[in-house]
Amino acid sequence: MQELDTVLPFQFEKSDVKGRIGIISNSVRQILKNKDYPPMVACIVAEACILTALIGQSMELKWKLSLQIRGKGPLRLIASDYFNFGTKDDSFSIRCHSSFDQSFSFLPNHEFRNLIKDGYFAVIIDEGAGKEPYQGITPLIGNSLSECAESFFHQSEQLPTRFSIKVDENTMNAGGIMLQYLAKGSEAIRHQELTGESLTSSDFLSGSASEDWKRVNTFLNTLGSDELFEPKVSKERLLYRLFNEESPTVQSERKIAFGCTCSPKKVKQTMSIYSSNDIKKMTNEVGKVTAECQFCGAKYSFNPKELGMEADCFE
């Protein structure tokens, strides 16, 4: 029987293509449990979660990957984190939240590009203390989060990349497959610098490499909408069904679970930039300053004297 909340990396012996297949349904349902998101926003958050898990699978222990998608439309922000802090095994935690115009009616016929409008897709990788975080930012290009992620890898990393993401809006099962060609294309990069045009996978590949990429994408297109979530079909068996002509080989599977890093100490650190007047304005009628974590919904209550630049105590 297939285990949920794992990502399995693989590589093809007959072409320079690697990939990952993942299902994180339990984590997605946990993330959405305390959220009052419209169904369409919930599905986009689920898509962001599986994209984060697929991209983050290459992260080393104690690294943190963050995706941030910001726009100027009614869907303003999607933010996700993928991290492992101090655990002895190689399991990772994931969390995600969205900010949106709550007066807007999100309908199934709304296109993603009209919900997010102009904005950017950002990937931040924090390798820990003493190292400068990596940050890659590209404009939002595409009519889904998956297409925007593909565009990010084309523009920022110059890597032909494809995602096939499946989300069941009734059960919130969430899974997907990522493919990536291993070679980079310097000619395509020079062409972009000269013309300013956006890059696609076809700009990087020619000859047999282009044929390989087209072939594996054709196989990926046969993935059924519910096939990822069939409990009697393992990830390995599904990969063989899709890509048996490519001779796929798999590596170690990574476990993923919902998790959050919020704490009273971190809330105090966040509030330390505010003056005593600011803190006074935040104080409620019973003399407390309250805060709620956007990711997990944890609620915190503080004595105003504990917060701000002039705090009596700051742990």
Image (tube, rainbow, N blue to C red):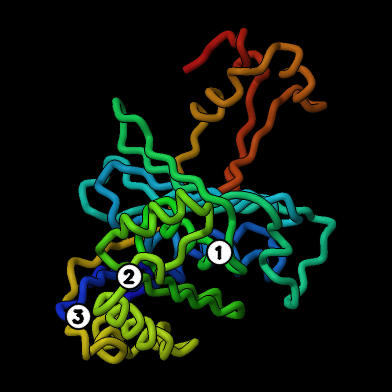
* Sequence-first disc among 3 and 2: 2
Q: Which residue is mark 3?
A: 248
Circle 1: element type: helix
Q: Kindly indicate the quadrant of the structure image that contains residue 276.
A: top right
Which quadrant holds the N terminus? bottom left
Q: Is residue 31 visible?
A: yes
- Looking at the image, is 242 positioned above or below residue 252? below
Indicate left or right for 151 with 177 as reference. right
First of labels 2, 1 by sequence position: 1
Please state which of residues 230 and 56 is positioned toward the viewer in this rendering: 56
On the image, which quarter does residue 56 sit in? bottom left
Query: Callout 3: few (<14), some (14-19), or many (20+) C-alpha neighbours within 10 Å?
Result: many
Q: Which residue, as the protein is rendered here, is positioned at the far front?
A: 194
The residue tagged with tag 3: helix, strand or loop? strand
Mark 1: amino acid: Leu
Question: Is residue 1 visible in this depiction of the protein?
Answer: no
Residue of label 2: 205
Q: Position of residue 268 (x, y in %)?
A: 55, 24
What residue lies at 25% left-to-right and 62% top-to-bottom?
Answer: 183
Q: Could you say which disc has been placed on residue 145 in the image?
A: 1
Element marked by disc 2: loop
Q: Earlier in the sequence, mark 3 or mark 1?
A: 1
Q: Does residue 150 appear to the left or right of 2 in the view shown? A: right
Q: Residue 161: image x %, image y %?
A: 38, 67
